[in-house]
Image (tube, rainbow, N blue to C red):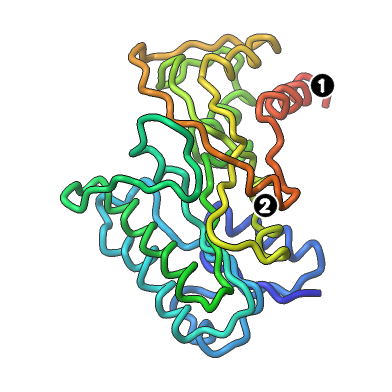
Amino acid sequence: MSRYTVIGAGGYIGRRLVKTLTESGHEVFAPGRDNGDLFGADLGKVFYCAGLTGDYRTRPYDTAEAHVGLISRLLDQGRFDRLVYLSSTRLYDVLSDGVASEDRALPLNSNDPRHVYELTKMTGEVLAVTQSGGRGCVARLAYVFDEAGDGFLSQWLARATQDRDLTLDSSPGNGRDYIHLDDVVRGLRAMLDQDAQGIVNLASGERLTNRAIASVFEARGWRISFSQTQDMALPVNIAVDRLAALGASARPVLPLIDAWLGSLAQPR
């Protein structure tokens, strides 16, 4: 069995990685970021999950440390076989048209404080790919969900277990590319086990509007309404060819939601 290290094991994705790898019989090291063994031990295959999301604006220095500082020291001082640095398809939100492919240039502005997240993530990406001696790669994750997460779709699913009449704080036309947490774990493992190079988008490749998701709920007997009417522009389509080449394509999201809702309707 392989030895894996999960950095950021206390987070949403890190916790699932630790659970899945442990249940598969692998040796898993899940150190805190201040653990001295992080730079002395043989880390094996590394999942770098450390990062900030919603609170990056109020914690810019912590954001820089998680996205750039720690990965810099790990690449410089750490002992590992392979490493995948978790980034985000949120980087593509600065694009207004076309397809979000991994090699596409992104127009970011260092004078815009909203771009602290994107600029630090991209710096971490560059370091992981170019300063790892060919042992590092980058996973850009779309919006991850399952019934236990804390994102918009995850909370929607969680509320559905308690109430069949839901009003959501969004608009029908808003949408994102979603990927189930289990597909993220499968994709990340494929990237390390198959020595993926460069950047790989972990996404479904499908933009789903709230309206489309609501139709699945309504077909199963839920009543869905929205508190907002102003739609945001849909994000650009995300290329998923590289993920498919690894044999780890994400499953279509609407059938997953439909099957899960169907399981709720069954007698317990």
- The relative height of residue 64 versus residue 4 in the rendered view (above or below) is above
Q: Decide: is 84 above or below 111.
A: below
Q: Looking at the rendering, in which quadrant would you find the N terminus? A: bottom right
Left or right, residue 111 beside residue 163: left
Q: Is residue 169 above or below residue 152?
A: above
Q: Is residue 80 left or right of residue 252?
A: left
Residue 205, numbered circle: none
Determine which residue is flagged by label 2: 187
User: Which of labels 1 and 2 is toward the front?
Assistant: 2
Residue at disc 1, secondary structure: loop
Disc 2 crowd rating (10 Å Cα; few below 14, some 14-19, many 20+) is: many
The quarter of the picture where residue 180 lies is top right
Which residue occupies 59% across, 65% down?
47
Residue 260, horizontal then vertical, whole percent: 73, 28
| Of the pair 262 and 66, the residue shown nearer to us | 66
Q: Residue at x 36, y 36 (%)?
A: 95
User: Residue 266, which numbered label?
Assistant: 1
Across the whole image, how many numbered discs are drawn on residues?
Answer: 2
Residue drawn at (54%, 86%) of the image: 37
81 to the left or right of 76: right
Q: Quadrant of the C terminus?
A: top right
Q: Residue at the far bottom: name it.
A: 40
Task: Tell me the amino acid under the disc marked 2.
Answer: Gly
**Rendering coords of residue 209 (x, y %):** 51, 20
Residue type at mark 1 is Gln
Q: Quick one: label 1 or label 2, which is nearer the N terminus?
A: 2
